[in-house]
Amino acid sequence: MNSIELRKIIGIFLTFGIMSVAQVGWAQQPEVASQTQARDIPAKKVPVPTTLSPELTRVVAEPIPAIPTLKTSDQWRQAQKSLDTARTELTMKLAASTGAKIEEIQIAGVRCHRVTPAEISKGFENRLLVHVHGGAFVLGGGLAGAMEAVLVSNATGCVSLSIDYRMPPDHPFPAALDDVVNVWKELTKSHSAKTMALYGTSAGGGLVLSTIHKLKQGSIPLPAAIFAGTPVSDMTKTGDSYYTNSEICNGLGRYEGFLEDAFRIYAGAQDMHSPLLSPIYGDTAGFPPTLLISGTRDLFLSNTVRMHRKLRESNIPCDLHVYEAQSHADYLKAFDARESKDAMREIREFFDKHLEHQ
């Protein structure tokens, strides 16, 4: 073999990889691995990238939180009270620091929190953003669930209405979905759906997507746009990142344990493949323009990516933003980071683009 032939072979390796060489006959094609065959990964350390803002770096470096196993209804209620107390305090501090006003109101018999930012942006005076809080379907009751609404209202300069939907253990599926749908139906009596958006993160993002399925079933006017941040689009352990980002995502840790238990107590005896629980399995034709956000360490990265492709297959205008090194909903936890401010800017511009002026 002369030097010219050797350079050609090296070039093929560099350009196309080893499989290209096999395909042209210079190596034997290996047998296709079984679809059920798992890949063993050796133990390794995953450092915090050096490219992040100081605020995000601190969040990415945090350990996975330890959440005890909860079995009884009383244990779930105690956990809700403990975890939601801390989030309520954070919501109030954020409201005070941004000048937002939070008012508790009732809509269609459902408790909601109306969040009015310190300043309404030009063009957003007659628009309304309807918020569905996260918390694995079991956390975020009361003011604890309005934190994201404060952040988004401050970033957009638009009023948000945060829905304080019913939750397990006392109110499993479909109570939460029914509350969101009923509030939305009531709002469409006094607001044009073309001037409203529906948004939420995590379980809230999943409920937003499931709500669209429910609204379509009832031929109810759809929002002009939706934002589903790192959504629970599939409750089952199906997506790739449920495995690849397990123990990497410090927001959720892993599927097994608290997360799986929360999904099960919410779903009850229902099949988790139902589109009203796992919206990835529903018909996405006719969905509103959708914004999706996730991160490279997010346990729900595949939930988000799969939903994006499903919507694009239905020719729905859909933007996907995946942020470096972020775990589940880090754009809310590191809310003062430049990366989070960038995410809020994307949300504002997306809503401004798709919501009509009245």
Image (cartoon, rainbow, N blue to C red):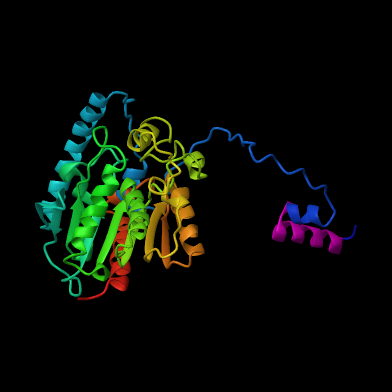
Q: Does the magenta stretch include residue 7?
A: yes
| Residue 204 or residue 296, whichever sits in front | 204
Residue 231 shows in the view: yes
Q: Nearer the viewer, residue 178 or 227?
A: 178
- For the record, the magenta segment spans 3-18
Left of 295 or right of it: where is 127? left
The answer to whether residue 28 is left or right of residue 59 is: right
Q: Which residue is drawn at 37% across and 38% down?
A: 252
Residue 155 picture quarter: bottom left
> Which of the two residues, 266 or 7, is positioned nearer the viewer here?
266
What is the quadrant of the C terminus in the image?
bottom left
Place of residue 107 in the rendered image (x, y in percent of width and height, measured from the top left): 14, 54
Q: What residue occupies the far front of the structure in this picture? A: 218
Dominant secondary structure (helix, strand or loop) of the stretch shown in magenta: helix
In which image quadrant can residue 307 be found? bottom left
Whether residue 333 is visible to the viewer of this picture, yes or no, is no
Q: Residue furthest right?
A: 1
Residue appearing at x 15%, y 45% in the figure: 143
Residue ID at (13%, 56%): 114
Residue 105 or 83: which is nearer the viewer? 105
* Placement of 121 over or under 43, stated as above or below: below
Residue 154 locus on image (x, y percent): 19, 60
Instruction: Give the vertical position of 251 relative to 123 (above or below).
Output: above
Quadrant in which the N terminus appears: bottom right
Residue 118 in the image: x percent, y percent?
Answer: 11, 62
Q: Where is residue 221 in the image (x, y as percent from the top left)?
A: 29, 65
